Amino acid sequence: HLHYNLTTGTFPIPGSSDKKRVRGLMARGDIKDGEIIFAVPPQLLWNLRMLASHPVLKKVYDEVPELHDGMRGLAVLLLYESFNRTSAWRPYLCSLPEHVPLPIFYSPKKY
């Protein structure tokens, strides 16, 4: 489900002087307080439960406690699925851009 006043696409990065663009969502009209803007079916959400029950990665997850941390565990799942030629996720993962400029990864000089 995607709210009727939302659109997906690639958009210029606000405040950026170059012509780089980023994928995202943009409101093209009003969205009322309390309205659902999008919904994701549970089977499409990536989380540590997916890793813990994965047919191949479960054993690794059980043996390596460091993977119980969200970022590390999800990174392993992401790598496995993106390199697995039979993965249903692979076409989507391969379509993603190689670099997305997220503020969380900016250096202090970027500010």
Image (cartoon, grey):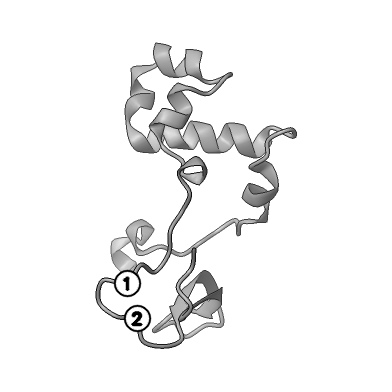
Label 1 Cα crowd, 10 Å radius (few <14 / some 14-19 / many 20+): few
Q: Is residue 15 above or below residue 95?
A: below
Name which quarter of the figure residue 27 lies in.
bottom left
Residue 17: x and y, percent? Answer: 47, 85
The tag on residue 89 is none
Question: Which amino acid type is marked by label 2?
Answer: Ile
Residue in view at x 56 percent, y 82 percent: 19
Residue 12: x and y, percent? Answer: 51, 81
Residue 69: x and y, percent? Answer: 32, 31
Residue in view at x 57 percent, y 36 percent: 79
Residue holding disc 2: 31
Say left or right for 89 vs 20: right
Q: Residue furthest left?
A: 33
Q: Residue furthest right?
A: 85
The tag on residue 35 is 1
Q: Is residue 82 above or below residue 76?
A: below
